[in-house]
Amino acid sequence: MASQPPQPPSGQPDTQYEEYQSEVITETTNRPTPAADVYEITPTNDVMDDRYEHEHDDYESGAMYETVRTWSPQSRPELVRIASVFSRIDSHPDVAPTTEDGGQLNRRDTLAGVKIGDPVLDPTKPEFDFYKWARMFTHVMEKEGIKRNRTGVMFRNLTVLGSGSAVQYQDTFLSPFAAPFRPGELCGKGRNPEKVILHDFNGAIREGELLMVLGRPGSGCSTFLKAICGELHGLQKKKESIIHYNGVSQHTFKKELRGEAVYSAEDEHHFPHLTVGQTLEFAAAARTPSKRVLGLSRKDFSTHLARVMMSVFGLSHTYNTKVGDDYVRGVSGGERKRVSIAEIALSGAPICCWDNSTRGLDSATALEFTKALKIGSQVGGITQCLAIYQASQAIYDIFDKVIVLYEGRQIFFGPTRIAKQYFEEMGWYCPPRQTTADFLTSVTNPKERIAKEGYENRVPRTAVEFERYWKQSQNNKLLLADMDRFEAEYPPEEGHLEKLRETHGQAQAKHTASKSPYRISVPMQVKLCTVRAYQRLWGDKSSTIATNISQIMMALIIGSLFFDTPQTTDGFFAKGSVIFFAILLNGLMSITEINGLCKATDPIVPNAQRPIVVKHVNFAFYHAYSEALAGIVADIPIKFLLALVFNIIIYFLGGLERSAAKFFIFFLFTFITILTMSAIFRTLAAATKTIPQALALAGVMILALVIYTGFTLQPSYMHPWFKWILYINPIAYAYEALLVNEVHGNRYRCATPIPPYGSGTNFACAVAGAVPGEMSVSGDAWVESSYDYSYAHIWRNLGILLGFLAFFYFVYLVVSELNLSSASSAEFLVFRRGHLPKNFQGSKDEEAAAGGVMYPNDPARLPPTNTNGAAGETAPGGSTVAVIPPQKDIFTWRNVTYDITIKGEPRRLLDNISGWVRPGTLTALMGVSGAGKTTLLDALAQRTTMGVITGDMLVNGRPLDSSFQRKTGYVQQQDLHLETTTVREALRFSADLRQPKSVSRKEKYEYVEDVIKMLSMEDFSEAVVGNPGEGLNVEQRKLLTIGVELAAKPQLLLFLDEPTSGLDSQSSWSIVTFLRKLADNGQAVLSTIHQPSGILFEQFDRLLFLAKGGRTVYFGDIGKNSETLLNYFETHGAEPCGPSENPAEYMLNVVGAGPSGKSKIDWPAVWKESEESRHVQQELDRIQSETSKRNEGHGQSAEKEPGEFAMPFTSQLYCVTTRVFQQYWRTPSYIWGKLLLGLTSALFIGFSFFLQNSSMAGLQNSLFSIFMLTTIFSSLVQQIMPRFVTQRDLFEVRERPSRAYSWKVFLLANIIVEIPYQILLGIIAWASLFYPTFGAHLSSERQGILLLYCVQFFIFASTFAQMIIAGLPDAETAGGIATTMFGLMVTFNGVLQKPNALPGFWRFMWRVSPITYTVGGLAATSLHSREVKCAQNELAIFDPPSGATCAQYLQKLVEAGAPGKLYNPMSTSQCQYCPLSSGDQFLGGSEIHWSDRWRNFGIGWAYIVFNIFATVALYYLIRVRKSSGRPNRIISVITYHLSQFGTYCRAFITGRKEKCPRKREQIGKIY
């Protein structure tokens, strides 16, 4: 029966409307003037007034903020002085604030009784009372005439538009080839249309009010908050939309007062190496006003405010602790969230919007946070909006107003106290113990909401019907009337803007533009950011020191490589090489400045800090260019010191002339080059949006810079199509200056006079620039003849370099300011082509397309267990849970203890825990923060990798065997899945490998389909997992995680670690009710859960509750309505649980959960002595006795357990290899990136060295072209390693502990899959390089050999990458080591320094370098038997003795076997002798021989085989073998320092540096 269009209920009592209307009028007419409003502490609705009077007792007692504080002794006197001054101020205003009718405000003066030195005003004291401090602080501000901006916000017809689609198709390797066959997409047909995200919102939030924003994920809560603050990047408002702040338009407000409306994103972005104190003091300093209370200095004022906020949010004990992140150890996740909250609080903005800022906080901390917001609103007049997914009733009651969103539509806006009544009168039923916030959100969930009896066909169903009902309601009419009064009170752009400007101007420092949104001037911003940059450097000083050491080591290696270079003409090439190395390593060391993967762990790195800079610019802390300029200023001294040490070593060790003047010129140019290249790389990083873009551009740029420096390819040999690069290459100008500086004014003894027996003018030196008859060669003549360089250019080049420097610094500052914003993107599902579900085809759902609805018909959401019999909207499919096989095994554990050594000190994480899990029961594992819930789960599931575990863990009274992990399912808190696989494929993979071999594949796949139905995943079963935002949403990922474990058919039990983490209350309900169904159908379930609501808590049968230190507080039945559990606590001295109180929250409060919670009762001790504890031990004895008898009865007939894995090795290898192939095929960015890297690099090299002639320089250039090909190696390695790590993370975290397949299978599969793509890459590089460089004149045999060598080289690169990454923790560390090793390989391969010129202690490196054999084979094949035709400047030209021909004169030289060739034997003058006659002679100088080509090829394959065996061995030794951990730590330390050594070596090769070095405390972590 179709439901009738919903109408507001007629005939219902309208007392709520009258009450609301009365309240609105009271709020409007009885509001004090802005000057007196500072004293108003009465909440805006009466219910809050009464409630807050009681809650305020907590604030007076100071218990809420009791925490350990650690302040420096130097700061304490100033804090005491401020507290003392505050306490002496008259606590009673001379005139009590009154309403307009003369009546005094009903308030409670909490300042009465404050005495001198009262600790309630000192944030360093446990008695500190934030409410009293805030009241006193604002009172002092008022007395001293210091104004503070206050403003409300009104929005009318707010409609936000975006573009996007609910679905996208997955690309594959062949997608570019298929694009021409989809002309509709190419021509723009079907492009994402404009979508409406927020529909016609209306509301008014007056200053000092708290607004709660409720809605399911994807309903538009974040977009609404961003719209209020004006942070709609990539989205746009409709022209009809109006947002103003007390009459000031949003455009004007954001332009002049940007920092007065701030948005707190859900994610945290902080500099991890800054301490909490430094982070918050910076925020306070950036917003410190010019006029301050008590005449405090800026430093004292900012320090005091920062410490107040730290006290309020329980961060005092973390003052000297690093903030940290995923890679740097620091504060906990919850504490980091509080740092973000405190940072915004210190911004002093009158409008704050908080996006799910309570996520990750326990209920006690979330409540304290909300109360702090309330104090800020009441005392400071701050207008605040908070989107929250899971809110307790206590949190909800603090708010003044609430807005409810449903698929981007507003369905309620009004006082919090009437919202529940509004929806109940609409016809919806609120179950007992359900919080109001959950109830309001539940009405937007068709699978959860319950209509009252008789209202089933009257209530609205869709979002549009809810919106229509709201717009026709009396509440909406009252809201519109209130908005009209708001606009009448604050006319557009009249009065209030000037007040805001005046107040803002009072806070601004000198030399700050009046209309600037910033409070401090640009010089102050630069100074503040510079100090912060040095703080970051000091915080990460180990990485800074390691970087400098690695640079020094590189200087020592390069310098020693050219040690004792002869000061003859034989040393010309070596001098060019050492200067080439010096200028490249100096110039390219700044490549790390585009490394955004460091996530702000690298000091002064633009892309790394971009999210933080964007946040701070939005908060009006500083200009983006101020931060950029500060990075430059802070970087110059460090670069200067590093350059000084580096260049001293390489200059004097590398055999350069020991002249003070020349050294200082050398240092000047190298230092200017460092700064210039730093400016270029910074500009590149600032101009791009993503790190892959920056790295791709940098890779191409570095290749061009290296080739067109003038050394590897001399200017006279450059082709016109690329020669222009020479003129815009800063390194080329520096190279010319350094080379002419070195040889200017010097003469070098001729090492090879032709003929050696000549005299007078009858001989010449076979070197460019030589003069016949002279035994020495002028250095100036040599560089002019060889390179067309002149000493006269040296200062010209300096000016050009300075011009480059100034230009790129200017561009960097401009781009840093302009290229900050990033477009907001909508979430979408990704499907394989041809697998789009029918319900998505032709969908017209705007909200789904815009990211508002991600679940068509809510397939992922499960129907709740309707226990009250009311009519609910449920979905079919619940009965399919019956596919779970019946279970009879009981898992028990007794006296489980877990000890671990941390920093040399023993620590007990679990302390004698006992319990059991029976089939058909749902057991909750709960505890306070840090109690060891996950630790216990890991210990029971046999997933711990370190420490000592004692105790008994039995299945049916038997010890656990090798198949235990395979027989259990473990749903981890992190939803780890391969992003390229589909939901169905992930489930089938689990079933293929984890179900026994005796089950056919058909049966396995049929069971997978049952699991899909069981979890209601039919509509997204073909969806690709993807990444967050581009694939499955949070809930769908969690369902997939559960499904993967169910597909394995766990025979024993199912472990779940925080299955509701990060979900809203409705999603949490769906997950828990599903677990309830699993248990009802015979599955044994043990799940940790983070403070569930009362309704969720009732779904569990039994509870294991832990206190800090892993001690048991309770284990036993929960009972109906939690009676058993509550009775236990009340019997042992706890206060009774209130009838409306959540038992889970009550239990946590009783034991003293939360940062400031305490309990007078030692509950773990109570448990040990309780009758319930003894009963647990007795029950364990009984279970063990019964199961032992049952085992004896079965005797030998018991089924023999299979081995560690369910499937044989060959089946494992087939399945895993297929999946890895699939992953590569569906990651076209990786494959095409690899192929395009080879194609573009090879083509660029090929056409740069296009058809080189047969001169000596031409042969040298040909050899350099082969050498440049090998430089692709490092980029390939950096591409391969992250793919390997992605697979390995999934394997080691989920699949290896589940015993899905062997580690040997994992390694072999990854090695096998890379080979076909490397073969294809080798073919592409061969065709792209060798045909342009050498032409087609080579024989087919030689072309085939070149192809074989190219393919071998790229296969070697892939196996080398896998060998390095196999045993190391991450791609960043491995990348550093790989770059170091490759740097050594290419340095000692005989190209840049000939083997016979190497110092004796380095010659072994030439022999062990694999690149030696690759370059040797390629060069010998390419240049064998090639005739040499010397260029004019390469000939030795001299006159024979009078009367002799050239042939007669040189006959003795020719008979002695000289390798050269005489071009004019019959001439009697100007003999032209070329020192070489064939390419083989040229190659012989580098000990490269044609006869060794097949030997070199064989050695290359030997290295490949070695790489494979080393991969297996390293993985086994470091990541598989169980040991004490000491060898692994040693290996970690060694690899850490090797990675540091490779940091800047990488710059010379490709410039690819994926991530910053880690600190020492991170390197020991192997898993």
Image (spheres, rainbow, N blue to C red):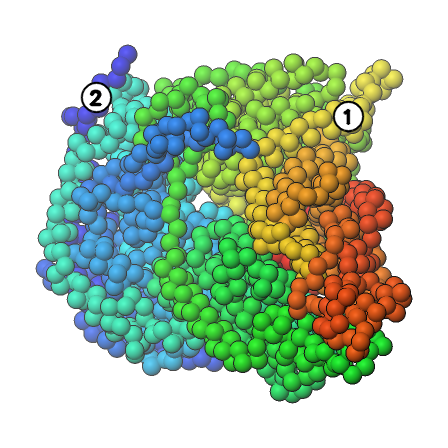
Residues 116 and 1000: in front is 1000
Q: Nearer the viewer, mark 2 or mark 1?
A: 1
The amino acid type, in three-letter code, at marker 1 is: Thr
Q: Is residue 898 above or below residue 66?
A: above
**Residue 387 in picture, x, y percent from top left:** 36, 45
From what the image shows, is residue 674 above or below residue 608?
Answer: below
Q: Which residue corresponds to the image point at 44% horizontal and 26% vertical from the top-left?
A: 181
Could you say where residue 1389 lies in the image, as x and y percent from the top left? 76, 58
Drawn side of residue 1529 relative to residue 785, left or right: right
As drawn, 850 above or below 842? below
Residue wearing tag 2 = 5
Q: Amino acid at mark 2?
A: Pro
x 13%, y 63%: residue: 495
Farthest residue toward the bottom?
Answer: 660
Q: Quadrant of the N terminus?
A: top left
Residue 737 appears at what percent x and percent y? 58, 76
- First in sequence: mark 2 vs mark 1: 2
Picture quadrant of residue 564: bottom right
Local secondary structure at mark 1: helix
Within 10 Å of the Cα at label 1, are there few (<14), some (14-19), or many (20+) other Cα atoms?
A: few
- Residue 253: in sight, yes or no? yes
Q: Which residue is mark 1?
A: 1210
Q: Tell me where residue 127 appears, x and y as whole percent.
A: 46, 67
Query: Which label is found at residue 1104?
Result: none
